[in-house]
Amino acid sequence: PVLVVDYGAQYAQLIARRVREAQVYSEVVPHTESVEALLARDPQAIVLSGGPSSVYAEGAPEVDPALFDAGVPVFGICYGFQAMARALGGTVEHTGSREFGRTELSADGGVLHADLPHRHPVWMSHGDSVTKAPAGFTVTGGSDGAPVAAFEDVERRFAGVQYHPEVAHSPHGQEVLRRFLHDVAGLRPSWTIASIVDEQVARIREQVGDGRAICGLSGGVDSAVAAALVQRAIGDRLTCVFVDHGLLRAGERGQVERDFVAATGVNLVTVDAADRFLAALDGVTEPEQKRKIIGREFIRVFEQAERDLKAQGDYRFLVQGTLYPDVVESGGGTGAANIKSHHNVGGLPEDLAFELVEPLRELFKDEVRRVGLELGLPETIVHRQPFPGPGLGIRIIGAVTSARLEILRAADSIAREELTAAGLDRDIWQCPVVLLADVHSVGVQGDFRTYGHPVVLRPVSSEDAMTADWTRLPYDVLERISTRITNEVRDVNRVVLDVTSKPPGTIEWE
Ligand code: XMP
């Protein structure tokens, strides 16, 4: 793999994605890993990420110069660029000229910037600057605030840039990264969707052997793709279990039972577990507690399914559609904080008796979608908008009851109908509808005072759910949704729009 060494930047994941877009497999590793440990992973190249620190700050992570003796190509970005300059004998200074945001780069020659416009915009975020490149390097770019903003030593296969090539605000950034990987490091673009499928199928076969697996289907894209992958690997030794936990949206169950089975012919068992989930959630309002309860109940249902299936054989494995962002955001990444416990990662009970099979654990959502298409799943499944495993349970702010679920289900289905009718499904990433069940607001409907609940529309645009922006929906669509919800849904007298990006807000409210 290409290892992206994470210096605490929020961009490390994004860099890994961009490397993969250049068709080279990439993983993120913490900067606390020693050079020996890094090299033991047999990296094809190493990318040093940006980070919040100044190279002069107390305790600022340094780059062990031994890294540069291993013959492995290295690319430094922002903080990584400065740390690299310092480790190799260049100079980094507090010049007093900081640059944040859009900056003009003057680029000249070299391999990374050859044939690009001489001046072009890049995204900067730095306080210190490299003032002298290390011996052997050619300086190929500079900006007003950073005299040395790009350098390369093609012979030793080292290069770096002060700016952030991974963000969309650096329009030539992907090209520069690609040139490093393909032209400087000499890596072949061989990480394709077909190769991911082959590799995962081989890994699943190795892990499961001649055993049997249960796959929890949620109706979402991830578990569907995970199931299809495992089915390709072990055929009918896979049984899918669809848990109707009562927190589903209108029509969801029918869609899984119909569309998914039609597409894959997989063995499917549906379990009615609404009573059990509602009982376990009774009176619970705290979001993390809800998530943990739901995660635990899912597993209890799978355990019951395993006992019921005993006659057919031993189902020791549990397939989950866990994605890379789930792992990172549940605190499973490298030094990452626990933002929320995704039901299938941080929400798992400790006494889990299954061995997990998680073939999508290294992938981002858009990659998963492409794997799904490669496996022959229909667009209706692959391009479904994400719906979280804990379902409507984390979209009712307050305790979950069946009456509240009914209200939310009705409002959600109106919003979805109108968004689909307006042809907006592919423009938005997802649009949670949230019921503020513990909030009341006064309204007037049909000459009477009402004292009902607000619902929130949360339309977002995103590439991978790690970051998101609120979607500017047309006013007429918002109006239709609002009018219909307040007319048709009992107890809702107000519709409000969430205009918060992520960060600072997460996509779901809980
Ligand atoms: P947040 O709210 O963390 O959501 O910004 C990011 C994406 O993940 C979905 N999500 C979940 N999916 N289990 C899931 O399968 C979960 O526990 C969970 N929590 C959030 C959310 O819908 C969004 O697409």
Image (cartoon, rainbow, N blue to C red):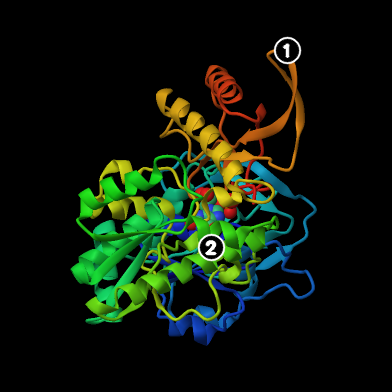
> Does residue 195 lie above or below 274 as drawn?
below
Query: In the image shown, does 432 or 246 lie closer to the viewer?
Result: 246
Q: Residue 66 placed where, x, y %? A: 55, 84
Residue assigned mark 1: 447
Question: Which quadrant: the N terminus?
Answer: bottom left
Q: Can residue 102 be seen from the camera position used here?
A: yes
Residue name at image x 52 percent, y 21 percent: 477
In the figure, is residue 37 to the left or right of 53?
left
Taking the view exactly as shown, the residue that stands out farthest to the top is 447
Q: Which image quarter: residue 307?
A: bottom left
Q: Residue 398 placed where, x, y %? A: 69, 49
What's the residue type where badge 2 is placed?
Answer: His
Residue name at image x 38 percent, y 51 percent: 221
Residue name at image x 44 percent, y 63 percent: 322
Tell me the SS state at disc 1. loop
Residue name at image x 63 percent, y 49 percent: 506
Residue assigned mark 2: 343
